[in-house]
Structures are given as C-alpha cells and as structure tokens.
C-alpha cells in the first residue's frame, strides 16, 4: 500500500472507528463465484472489478469460529471483516482518542462552575433548570461532533451527572425555600385575617383587581373607661384591654372577618 506512516509504531492498543455494522461495510464475494468462468467474465469483468481495490481473502464460515464481538451491534463480525476495518481505519486515519485525565477532570469542574454561576445569575428556578437542560443537550451535541469529525471520545457521564444533579438540587432547594416562605407568610397573615381570607390572598398574590363586597364594621366601647383606668392602674387596665381585644378578635375571625387595626382613644 506504500503507506507505512499510517501504521502506529508503538505497542499500545489503539481505538479505531468501524466502517459499518457486520456484513454492511465490505461486501463478501464467494470464492467459487470469483473462480467461476461465467461470473468472472460477467460479474467481475475479467478482473476489472478488483482493479485498484484492496482484496482480503479469508474464511467467513461459522465452522471455523472466526467471529468476534464489536461495539457496532450484537451480531458477530467475521475475522476478515475485522481486519478490513482495521486497515480502513489506518488508511483514513480513523483512530479514536480518549480525553486526557486532565481534560476529563476539567470538564467536571467546569460543569460544577457553570451550575454555580447559573444559580447566582438566574433567580428564576425553572428558567435556570431549563437553561441547564439546554446546556446539557448542547454538551451532548458537541461530544457527538467531536467523536464523529475529530475522533475524540468525550467523557459524558460525570459532567452530565454533575450538571443535571446540580440543576435538580437547586430546583428542589428553591421549591423548599419558597414553600417555607409561603408558610411563614401564611402564619403571619393568620394573625390578622381569617384562614379563608389568607388562602385567597396567597392564591392571588399582588392582586389589585377592584371588587365589590359588603362591609361590616364592629364599633365597641368600654363603658366608664376613665374610672376603670383610675381604679385598675396601668397594669390592670392593660390586662383588661387585652381580654376585651381577644373576645372581639375571636368574634370577627369566627365570621371570616379581617382585623385591620384597633382604633380608639
């Protein structure tokens, strides 16, 4: 073939790209057909068919057990076809190169840094998660491109797991944080509104829509408040007011009312 430079000179194993699935990359020609006068003349043009072609003669019968497993398919590939795939890879430089250990570790660190950066820049949880899924898809496309056109085997597993896990973890954290904030807000609102009103406000946050409703005002008065204050003193009057406010608040809340504030002299 006059291509000695195409053959690796070291003793290490070399990954290569297969041409096609078993039986599809290189056609088989039976020896009895090649040697038969009729086929030699009609099918092979008195040998012109094989001109400038590399021909490998070898057995493909299952009796000789010369079949091997390949990454291409579950179907076994005949030994001569394996050799032809190796020769074809050498002639066309179809060797595959795995990523270096440094590049593999760097891709993992980069995936983590990207996840942290997205958590810092994008506050919307779903936008951030969808962005991470988009980056993951782009990473897969880039890996396929490098494998198909550059012969580089990119480590997809761990960087993809880091990117996806960080995205899911951040989404879960934001969900729990939002849920906790809503629970604290609900507890605070329950101090001033009935559970029914609190549920409506939480279900419609920031609603400024005008509504018509019947309003009932509760006006109460504490008789003889001045003599009572003189008699009970500051501490006693304070305790009495708290008791009155508690009774009034319970009465309002029992009717799904809302306590705006206590007003009085």
Image (tube, rainbow, N blue to C red):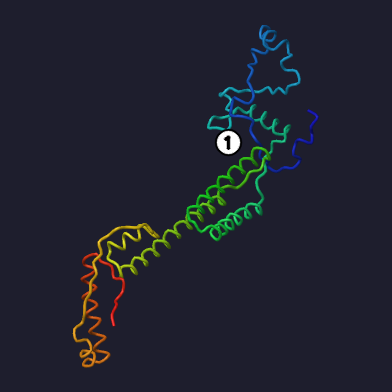
Residue 189 located left or right of residue 33 = left
Q: Position of residue 54 (x, y in %)?
A: 72, 23
Residue 100 relative to residue 230: left or right:
right
Drawn side of residue 262 relative to residue 207, left or right:
left
Q: Quadrant of the C terminus?
A: bottom left
Where does the N terminus fall, quadrant-wise? top right
Rendering quarter of residue 137: top right
Q: Position of residue 200 (x, y in %)?
A: 32, 59
Q: Residue at x 72, y 17 (%)?
A: 50
| Image vertical order of residue 222 relative to residue 183, above or below | below
Image quadrant assignment for residue 240: bottom left
Q: Which residue is mark 1?
A: 71
Residue 219 screen position, x and y as percent: 23, 74
Residue at position x 27%, y 89% in the image: 235
Please name the residue shown 54% across and 54% down the image.
Answer: 162
Q: Between 127 and 161, which is closer to the camera in this rendering?
A: 127
- Position of residue 85 relative to residue 133, above or below, is above
Q: Residue at x 79, y 36 (%)?
A: 5
């Amino acid at each position: 073939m006059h291509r000695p430079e195409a053959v690796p000179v070291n003793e290490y194993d070399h990954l290569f790209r297969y041409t096609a699935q078993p039986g599809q990359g290189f056609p088989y020609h039976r020896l009895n057909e090649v040697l038969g006068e009729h086929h030699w003349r009609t099918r092979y043009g008195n040998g012109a068919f094989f001109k400038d072609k590399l021909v490998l003669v070898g057995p493909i019968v299952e009796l000789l057990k010369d079949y091997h497993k390949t990454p291409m398919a579950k179907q076994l590939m005949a030994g001569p076809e394996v050799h032809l795939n190796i020769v074809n890879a050498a002639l066309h430089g179809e060797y595959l190169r795995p990523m270096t250990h440094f590049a593999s570790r760097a891709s993992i660190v980069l995936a983590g840094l990207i996840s942290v950066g997205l958590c810092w820049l994008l506050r919307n949880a779903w936008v951030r998660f969808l962005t991470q899924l988009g980056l993951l898809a782009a990473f897969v496309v880039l890996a396929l491109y490098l494998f198909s056109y550059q012969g580089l085997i990119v480590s997809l597993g761990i960087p993809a797991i880091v990117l996806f896990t960080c995205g899911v973890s951040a989404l879960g954290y934001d969900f729990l944080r939002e849920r906790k904030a809503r629970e604290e807000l609900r507890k605070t609102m329950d101090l001033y509104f009935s559970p029914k009103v609190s549920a409506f406000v939480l279900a419609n946050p920031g609603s400024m829509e005008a509504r018509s409703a019947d309003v009932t005002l509760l006006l109460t008065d504490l008789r003889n408040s001045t003599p009572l204050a003189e008699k009970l003193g500051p501490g006693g009057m304070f305790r009495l007011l708290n008791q009155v406010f508690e009774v009034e608040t319970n009465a309002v809340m029992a009717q799904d009312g809302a306590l705006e504030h206590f007003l009085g002299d």
